Image (spheres, grey):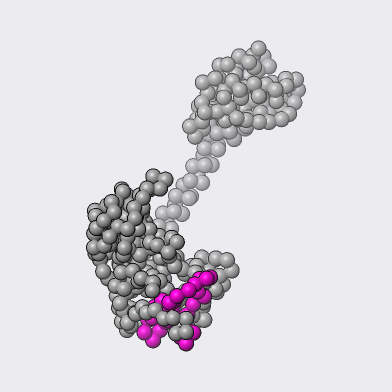
Amino acid sequence: MERIPCYELDPCLRTLDTQVLRAWVEEGQSWAVLEDTVLYPEGGGQPCDRGTANGIEVLEVRSHAGELRHRLAAPLAEGPVALVLDWARRFDHMQQHTGQHLLTALAQDRFGWPTMAFHLGEEVSDVELAVPTLSLGDRARLEEAIAAEIRAARPVRARRVDAEGYARETVRSRGLPEGHVGDIRLVEIAGVDLNTCGGTHLQHTGELESLALLGTEPMRGGLRLFFVAGGRVRRRLATHEARTAALRSLLGAPDAELVATLQGKLDQLLGADKRLRRTEEELAEALAEGLAEGLAAAPGVLSEVHLGERDMAFLQRLARQVLAAAPAKVVFLTAEAAGQGIFLLSAGPEATLDIPTLGRGVAEALGAKGGGSGKSFQGKAPDLAGRARALALLQG
């Protein structure tokens, strides 16, 4: 007969004295199989428990080939072992998983929204519902129905049945695992739900404390509904309250006016940003005009200048103005942008130099990546330490 582990017999048991049957190291990881355990293995959408074994941290528990394997932070010797469960983590998982059973049952039976999958996350959990959308009103009605069943403190019980017993029950299930043999574990919320499940659950729905529906997102033709239950609701509320208090202080507005006040500040910043961009463009245009006059009038075919902090758009504007005034010129412009060097090599329509070939030589001298064709070549370099070499190439 299959041995039922302690975590299933008593999900509130927090310690256990047992035996290490087998211990080994595999690919640098320490593993052990115990005679019994209070630590739940990952499965059914629920993460595994954690705890300690003789003071050594248990990092993972998984079911493999009919045995429960414990991965540890250090090797564990065969013989007696004292297990201590991380109860805070277990109780949180019990709240989220029991909350999911209640949510799924009411979504299906009261509203006709079937659950297709469940995921218990570190901060937020979710169910996938086979419905295209849920309105705010739909969510509010589901949340209130859940709250009513929490207030009712309905008993939650787990039991095992054989195949014949299972056939006589009205069970909510997406089907048993392929090749399943032996007893089937059922979890019942009295008067609400009967479900196949191997996870850990609360003793009654009152221990859920509360459950909040957070929002939805589209998922494979249905939607994912996010929720938190129990202690996570209180922690989330505390985080929101602290954030709201900080916003009240920063914005000098009461809670009811925070959004409007922040929107007003954002609108002001957007207007100021637009005005600043216009001013910068006007200054850049005036600077380009002044530089263009000097570069166009400079002797020789090649005109060059380093411009400090400027972007490629400014270099291109300056090159156009120079070459419009001096169509036989070639300009070599460099600048710094976002911590990188940038360069532009551009020729007027009357210039006869082979710009693509020269551009590749400049890029090599600068250790840059770039490209171009015809009369223009541009690129980016980690720095401009090779600018003198590039300039010598162009002047040679």
Residue at image location 63% in from the left, 19% down from the top: 303
Q: Would residue 174 be counted in the magenta stretch?
A: yes
Residue 191: give x, y in percent of width and height: 39, 86
Residue 276: give x, y in percent of width and height: 49, 42
The image quadrant that residue 238 belongs to is bottom left
Residue 24: give x, y in percent of width and height: 36, 50
The image quadrant that residue 342 belongs to is top right
Q: Would residue 6 be counted in the magenta stretch?
A: no
Determine whether 3 is above or below 326 in the image.
below
Residue at image location 51% in from the left, 65% down from the top: 217
- In this rendered view, identify the residue nearer to me: 264 or 20: 20
Determine whether 55 is above or below 394 in the image.
below
- In this rendered view, identify the residue nearer to me: 150 or 39: 39
- Residue 148 shows up from this direction: no
Instruction: Tell me the chief SS of the magenta region.
Output: loop
Residue at image location 48% in from the left, 46% down from the top: 273
Task: Give the magenta part as a residue range.
Answer: 167-196
- Residue 369 shows up from this direction: yes
Residue 303 relative to residue 215: left or right: right
Residue 227: give x, y in percent of width and height: 41, 68
Determine whether 91 is above or below 113 in the image.
above
Quadrant position of the C terminus in the picture? top right
Quadrant position of the N terminus in the picture? bottom left
Q: Looking at the image, which residue sits at the far top?
A: 396
Q: How many marks?
A: 0
Residue 317 relative to residue 125: left or right: right
- In this rendered view, identify the residue nearer to me: 147 or 325: 147
Residue at image location 73% in from the left, 21% down from the top: 354
